[in-house]
Image (spheres, rainbow, N blue to C red):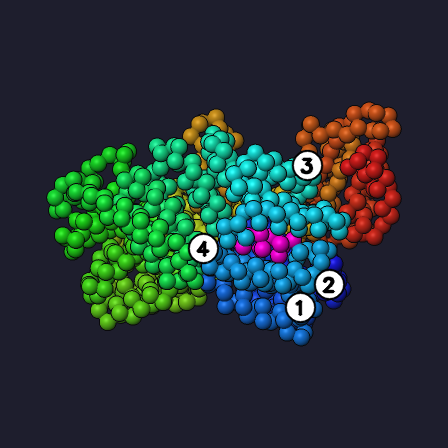
């Protein structure tokens, strides 16, 4: 059974009704999930929820809900935090109006998965039972057959029965083959892992590599590729092929929840033979993984990674790291359905930690801060310094420098919760005192999403330190991109007695107004900030760039020219619009959660005109005049010769004037001589059409009729949006009629509903 058939029919009906948005949301979300594009999938979740509420088909609620859980359980590896939603969807999927939806079976996979994440070993029997019951109701023609077979395999592994797991997965593969279904890569990777668990490493590697080789014939998603990579890493590490394994090990910055557990297990194996690589940075990554597992309620996995973290910390002599990791791991024991030996394992690690002598301070507590500041950066380790700093703070709890430095060291070790608590202790004890600790704490709370705590602290500061209360709330609004609230709060801040004569509130107001595209108001706020900065004899160059941006946004050319003059920037003319020709820049913007880049000509300090047509099917921005952020997104090279080819990259802020061009069309075929093509480009430009060549001199075509090798050419063409497609087709036909072999523009011909025969013939002839 094709469980997607109903959705394909639903898609056709929706498209026929002109309802494209829901389909785009679903398609974009599924693509983001399987490609582990976590930020895009997260950003699409609110739209997915809106779609579920508005969808006329109740099956869509189950379908979309299942894919949301595939993201949460797969990419975020959620446990207890997802349980309520999984159970609710499971109940919804089995109501009368959705019971026949094929994805109702998929929700059983979600149910097994969430219990696997929460406490895989503790819920083994129930996971196996629900898989067996559901598998008995479906046959091998369903995609769900493989998914549920995988869930039962995982349960058998968690049960500690790799032999049974191997036999089961091979049995399921045989059933699928007998039914004529050869798409069994998921089960084959399970087979490889079962062989690995049994110590049959060579066979495991061969099985896995066969899966990878088969996948080369088709596009595989990132989830599959990452899974194969991590399985291979574990096999290589177990085989002692360390050089190959280290080369395959993802960089710590690339460790996501999707791969974190496999990464941790492989790393411990590798470090056993390379103890010199066991550094505080390793501890920092493991601490981050541990805290993430706890945050999402994956209790058993938190204990597992905690044990790895503790063992490696003890091996490198980081007793503080080992102690705090132990405390976190032990705190998860009550969440388990049954300890199953984890309590004993942690008790044994407790004994090892208790046997480690406490590290003595290198100097007296009073001298520690200055002593650490004098030490060379090379050789310093936050793990060691944390232990010293916390000891010193026990003696000097009021020393703010020690506390701030300790918080920084804790953050370096990814112990963000400990760092936050350390600063909160001081803030709670000094509710009416202003300090750098107050502002450092705010940044930590914003980063960790502790919005309610920020509001609570702001309320406490209101009576005695209203400017700090205002700062807390304004910064929170800015961080959460609530620009309207941020602007209101920033303007209120400027009226506070403590903020009189200061530029701070005006600067925050300018930033918020820019985000709201209120450029004229933003200009006034930045100018007000400059007045205060000048009164305090502070440098204003950075603010002048803000003035330039706001003034360009509202086309106040007098203000633009005045700010440019203060920055000693030469502009053409003395008055009127600024329209320079300052060479090429690259622009970056985000639209529909996708990142786009294009080439443009800089027309002023912060304005540019896009000259590169969009790719086919992308939104056209050709000839748009845009406002961009002056800050560089790329770094100029130091080498003078390389600087000659450097193209600055900037972020687009706003479209000032649309270019009004239609879609781009792809044109491909044998190239005419340069003179003929130049004349073609001139003729197209005379009709306001833009030609953008993508091919280079290496692009060649073989004419099967003569076996002659011909130079090839492919380019993009964009025409004004008011030019009918039939007129554009006719123009192209006229301007290429005298070419030795006219190129094809099949996509345009089909859209224009003209005869496609010539184009298809050319495509087949040159295999384009």
Q: CA distance from mark 1 to mark 3?
A: 46 Å
Is residue 435 rendered to the left or right of residue 17? Answer: left
Q: Position of residue 603 (x, y in %)?
A: 53, 44
Q: CA distance from mark 4 to mark 3?
A: 35 Å
Image quadrant assignment for residue 513: bottom left
Q: Earlier in the sequence, mark 3 or mark 2?
A: 2
Chief secondary structure of the magenta portion: helix
Q: Are dots 4 and 3 in contact, CB under 8 Å?
A: no
- Report helix, strand or loop for mark 2: helix
User: Which residue lies under the disc numbered 3?
Assistant: 693
Q: Please state, as top left, top right, bottom left or bottom right, where the N terminus lies in the image.
A: bottom right
User: Which residue lies under the disc numbered 4?
Assistant: 550
Q: Residues within 10 Å of mark 4 (few under 14, many from 20)?
A: many
Q: Residues within 10 Å of mark 2 (few under 14, many from 20)?
A: few
Residue at the image position 57 percent from the left and 59 percent from the top: 128
Q: Which of the two marks, 3 or 2, is nearer to us in this view?
A: 2
Q: Nearer the viewer, residue 603 or 179?
A: 179
State which region is magenta. Answer: 146-155
Q: Position of residue 155 (x, y in %)?
A: 54, 55
Q: Position of residue 324 (x, y in %)?
A: 29, 51
Q: Earlier in the sequence, mark 1 or mark 3?
A: 1
User: Which residue lies under the disc numbered 1?
Assistant: 59
Q: Which of the two marks, 2 or 4, is nearer to us in this view?
A: 2
Q: CA distance from mark 2 to mark 4?
A: 51 Å
Q: Are dots 2 and 1 in contact, CB under 8 Å?
A: yes
């Amino acid at each position: 059974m094709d469980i997607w058939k109903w959705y394909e029919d639903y898609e056709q009906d929706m498209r026929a009704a002109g309802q494209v948005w829901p389909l785009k949301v679903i398609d974009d979300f599924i693509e983001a999930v399987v490609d582990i594009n976590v930020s895009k999938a997260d950003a699409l979740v609110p739209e997915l929820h809106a779609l579920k509420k508005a969808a006329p088909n109740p099956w869509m609620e189950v379908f979309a809900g299942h894919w949301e859980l595939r993201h949460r359980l797969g990419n975020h590896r959620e446990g207890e935090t997802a349980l309520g939603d999984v159970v609710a969807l499971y109940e919804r999927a089995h109501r009368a109006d959705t019971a026949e939806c094929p994805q109702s079976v998929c929700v059983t996979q979600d149910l097994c998965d969430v219990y696997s994440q929460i406490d895989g070993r503790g819920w083994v029997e129930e996971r196996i039972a629900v898989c067996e019951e559901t598998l008995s109701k479906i046959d091998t023609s369903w995609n769900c057959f493989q998914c549920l077979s995988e869930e039962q395999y995982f349960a058998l592994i968690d049960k500690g029965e790799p032999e049974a797991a191997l036999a089961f997965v091979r049995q399921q593969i045989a059933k699928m083959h007998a039914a004529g279904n050869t798409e069994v890569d998921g089960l084959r990777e399970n087979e490889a892992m079962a062989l690995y668990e049994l110590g049959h490493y060579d066979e495991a590697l061969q099985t896995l590599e066969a899966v990878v080789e088969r996948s080369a014939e088709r596009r595989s998603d990132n989830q599959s590729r990452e899974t194969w990579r991590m399985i291979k890493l574990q096999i290589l590490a177990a085989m002692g092929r360390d050089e190959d394994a280290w080369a395959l090990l993802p960089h710590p910055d690339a460790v996501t929840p999707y791969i974190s557990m496999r990464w941790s297990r492989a790393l411990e194996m590798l470090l056993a033979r390379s103890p010199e690589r066991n550094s505080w940075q390793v501890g920092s990554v493991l601490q981050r993984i541990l805290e993430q597992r706890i945050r999402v309620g994956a209790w058993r996995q938190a204990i597992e990674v905690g044990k790895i973290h503790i063992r490696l910390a003890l091996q490198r002599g980081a007793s503080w790291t080992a102690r705090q990791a132990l405390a976190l791991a032990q705190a998860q024991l009550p969440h388990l359905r049954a300890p199953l030996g984890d309590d004993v394992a942690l008790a044994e690690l407790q004994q090892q930690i208790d046997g480690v002598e406490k590290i003595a301070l290198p100097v007296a507590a009073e001298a520690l801060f200055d002593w650490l500041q004098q030490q060379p950066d090379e050789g310093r380790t936050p793990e060691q310094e944390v232990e010293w700093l916390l000891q010193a703070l026990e003696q000097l709890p009021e020393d703010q420098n020690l506390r701030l430095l300790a918080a920084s060291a804790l953050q370096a070790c990814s112990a963000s919760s400990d760092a936050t608590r350390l600063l909160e202790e001081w803030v709670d004890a000094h509710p009416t005192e202003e300090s750098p600790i107050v502002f450092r704490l705010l940044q930590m709370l914003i980063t960790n999403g502790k919005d309610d705590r920020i509001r609570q602290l702001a309320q406490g500061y209101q009576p005695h330190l209203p400017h700090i209360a205002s700062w807390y709330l304004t910064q929170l609004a800015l961080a959460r991109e609530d620009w309207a609230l941020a602007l209101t709060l920033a303007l209120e801040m400027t009226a506070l007695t403590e903020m009189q004569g200061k530029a701070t509130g005006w600067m925050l107001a300018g930033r918020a107004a820019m985000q709201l595209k209120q450029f004229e108001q933003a200009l006034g706020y930045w100018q007000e900030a400059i007045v205060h900065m000048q009164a305090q004899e502070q440098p204003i160059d950075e603010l002048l760039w803000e003035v330039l941006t706001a003034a360009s946004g509202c086309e106040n050319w007098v203000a633009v020219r005045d700010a440019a003059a203060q920055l000693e920037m030469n502009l053409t003319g003395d008055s009127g619009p600024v329209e320079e020709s300052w060479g090429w820049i690259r622009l970056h913007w985000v639209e529909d959660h996708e990142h786009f880049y294009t080439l443009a000509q800089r027309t002023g300090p912060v304005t540019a005109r896009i000259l590169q047509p969009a790719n086919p099917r992308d939104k056209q921005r050709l000839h748009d005049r845009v406002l961009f952020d002056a800050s560089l997104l790329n770094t100029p090279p130091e080498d003078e010769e390389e600087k000659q080819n450097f193209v600055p990259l900037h972020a687009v802020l706003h479209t000032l004037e649309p270019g009004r061009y239609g879609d781009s069309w792809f044109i491909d075929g044998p190239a005419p001589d340069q003179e003929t093509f130049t004349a073609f480009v001139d003729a197209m430009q005379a009709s306001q059409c833009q030609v953008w060549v993508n091919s280079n001199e290496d692009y060649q075509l073989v004419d099967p009729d003569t076996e002659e090798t011909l130079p090839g050419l492919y380019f993009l063409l964009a025409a004004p949006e008011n030019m009918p497609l039939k007129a554009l087709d006719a123009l192209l036909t006229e301007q290429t009629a005298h070419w030795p072999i006219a190129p094809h523009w099949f996509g345009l011909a089909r859209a224009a509903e003209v005869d496609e025969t010539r184009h298809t013939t050319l495509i087949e002839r040159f295999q384009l």
